[in-house]
Image (cartoon, rainbow, N blue to C red):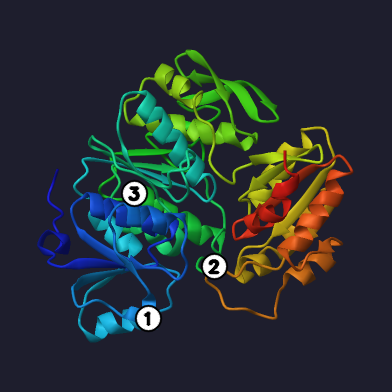
């Protein structure tokens, strides 16, 4: 591997991760540990990622314990406020601080092949698809994703070869700190409304990501950006004979020279065909034969919270989904409508800024199902506000307001009795509804 060519070459002491249990932070900390760095960290909540880190031998501590004297570098999550006590301690002691994006951009440099998956929608699914295809094709990539890769082992895999496959988020221009050799852009939408003022600014950021000096292959859907490898109608790879059913899809993966390979995706949602094309294009750019790509896609089983089947509730199928942007919610509803049953939706908005910006879009979409219920907004990194609320969204959409997860569970039980397809949707803590349903799920 190459040298880091930065402060990591001469680092002496521990790297301290603030917010180490987050999905991106976990993968970055685990990679640093596997690459031989001394790693320590803290998180405000215990979760599966903190347990995985302890199993790797990473010491974790309470935030109240303060910054250890051995700290040589502090890496922080964007969710940490600028006046967080540990950040203030680091500055007072002249300990260097880097955002997770800046640190990960340095950490990836020794990998000769660095394949980035960016896009307003579908990043985690496509990263997991690519990981599956590459493993089936004989590669052993190191993978850092933003979501569990689908087998319950978390969002990180340490590989054995020269390839780093990673999810590249555009929030706060994080992906501009990275140095990919192969850069995929799946889609562009005005998503992070607390950072980007409009879609044009998002597009400019993606264009900068694709035109980075390190990039050797640019991959994108036809018509989105100029690219070395394109996919979709008129591109290097495209889909034909698409059939979408509950629980999966079938299509033919076709090449511009006339070859065609059957693919069966064992994951729900018609939108997964578009994701599969993006994954196929990136893997083809990495040198995987298209036949092997098709075979690998057939083994993909999906990831958590992407039209994830959670069981049968009084005879009605229940799906958990991450959709929080109007485009994602619209695609989810179209897929559920195709099942031929009335749809019951429980929706948890994600962040006040996004809900406020897309309020009328959410109202329109919440009126589409047979019945809809709305939970309080999941604030995530944002402070509370009186300007918008879950209750106001429910009233505008003529939906039921569900103040608690227990209320949401009761709503779904009633909807199950009407023979509905049940959708539990949101990017926050909405899966907290499931424990109230688990005794009844078959």
Which residue is label 2 attached to? Answer: 197
Please provide percent x and percent y for residue 150. Answer: 49, 39
Q: CB of mark 1 within 8 Å of CB of mark 3?
A: no
Q: Residues within 10 Å of mark 1 (few under 14, many from 20)?
A: few
Q: Using the rendered image of the protein, determine whether residue 178 is visible from the camera's viewpoint.
A: no
Mark 2 or 1 closer to N-term? Answer: 1
Q: Quadrant of residue 268?
A: top right
- Does residue 252 appear left or right of residue 72 in this picture? right
- Does residue 47 appear left or right of residue 217 in this picture? right
Residue 349 — which label?
none
**Position of 245 relative to 21 (above/below):** above
Question: Could you tell me which residue is drawn at 55 percent across and 68 percent down?
Answer: 380
Task: Give the alpha-carbon distance from disc 1 to disc 3, as whole Å.
Answer: 43 Å
Please provide percent x and percent y for residue 256. Answer: 46, 19
Please provide percent x and percent y for residue 41. Answer: 32, 67
The residue closer to the viewer here, 388 or 314, is 314
Q: CB of mark 2 within 8 Å of CB of mark 1?
A: no
Question: Could you tell me which residue is drawn at 68 percent across and 27 percent down?
Answer: 244
Please provide percent x and percent y for residue 283. Answer: 38, 30
- Kind of element beneath mark 3: loop
The residue closer to the viewer here, 370 or 203, is 370
The C terminus, quarter of image: top right
Mark 2 or 3 closer to N-term? Answer: 2
Residue 211 — which label?
3
Which residue is label 1 attached to? Answer: 64
């Amino acid at each position: 591997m190459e040298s880091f060519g930065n402060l990591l070459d001469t680092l002496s002491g521990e790297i301290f991760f603030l917010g180490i249990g987050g999905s991106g932070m976990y993968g970055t900390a685990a990679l640093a540990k596997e690459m031989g760095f001394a790693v320590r960290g803290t998180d405000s909540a215990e979760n599966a990622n903190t347990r995985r880190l302890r199993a790797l031998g990473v010491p974790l501590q309470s935030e109240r314990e303060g910054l250890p004297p051995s700290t040589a570098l502090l890496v922080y999550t964007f969710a940490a406020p600028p006046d967080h006590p540990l950040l203030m301690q680091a500055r007072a002691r002249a300990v260097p601080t880097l955002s997770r994006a800046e640190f990960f951009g340095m950490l990836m440099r020794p990998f000769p092949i660095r394949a980035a998956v960016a896009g307003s929608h579908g990043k985690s699914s496509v990263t997991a698809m690519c990981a599956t295809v590459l493993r089936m094709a004989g590669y052993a990539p190191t993978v850092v994703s933003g979501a569990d890769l689908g087998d319950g082992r978390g969002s990180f895999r340490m590989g054995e070869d020269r390839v780093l496959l990673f999810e590249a988020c555009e929030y706060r221009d994080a992906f501009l700190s990275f140095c990919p050799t192969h850069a995929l852009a799946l889609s562009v939408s005005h998503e992070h409304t607390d950072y980007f003022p409009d879609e044009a600014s998002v597009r400019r950021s993606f264009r900068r990501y694709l035109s980075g000096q390190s990039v050797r292959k640019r991959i994108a859907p036809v018509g989105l950006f100029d690219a070395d490898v394109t996919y979709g109608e008129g591109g290097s790879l495209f889909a034909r004979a698409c059939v979408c059913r509950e629980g999966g899809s079938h299509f033919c993966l076709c090449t511009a020279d006339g070859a065609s390979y059957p693919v069966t995706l064992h994951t729900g949602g018609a939108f997964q065909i578009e994701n599969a094309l993006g994954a196929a294009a990136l893997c083809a750019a990495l040198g995987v034969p298209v036949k092997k790509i098709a075979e690998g896609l057939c083994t993909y089983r999906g990831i958590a919270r992407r039209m994830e089947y959670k069981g049968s509730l009084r005879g009605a199928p229940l799906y958990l989904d991450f959709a929080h942007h109007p485009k994602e919610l619209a695609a989810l509803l179209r897929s559920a409508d195709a099942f031929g049953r009335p749809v019951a939706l429980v929706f948890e908005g994600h962040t006040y800024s996004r809900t406020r910006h897309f309020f009328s879009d959410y109202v329109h979409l919440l009126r589409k199902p047979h019945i809809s219920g709305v939970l309080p907004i999941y604030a995530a990194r944002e402070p509370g506000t009186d300007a918008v609320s879950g209750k106001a969204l429910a009233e505008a959409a003529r939906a039921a307001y569900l103040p608690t997860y227990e209320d949401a569970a009761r709503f779904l039980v009633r909807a199950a009795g009407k023979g509905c397809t049940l959708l539990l949707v949101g990017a926050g803590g909405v899966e907290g509804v499931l424990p109230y349903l688990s005794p009844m799920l078959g």
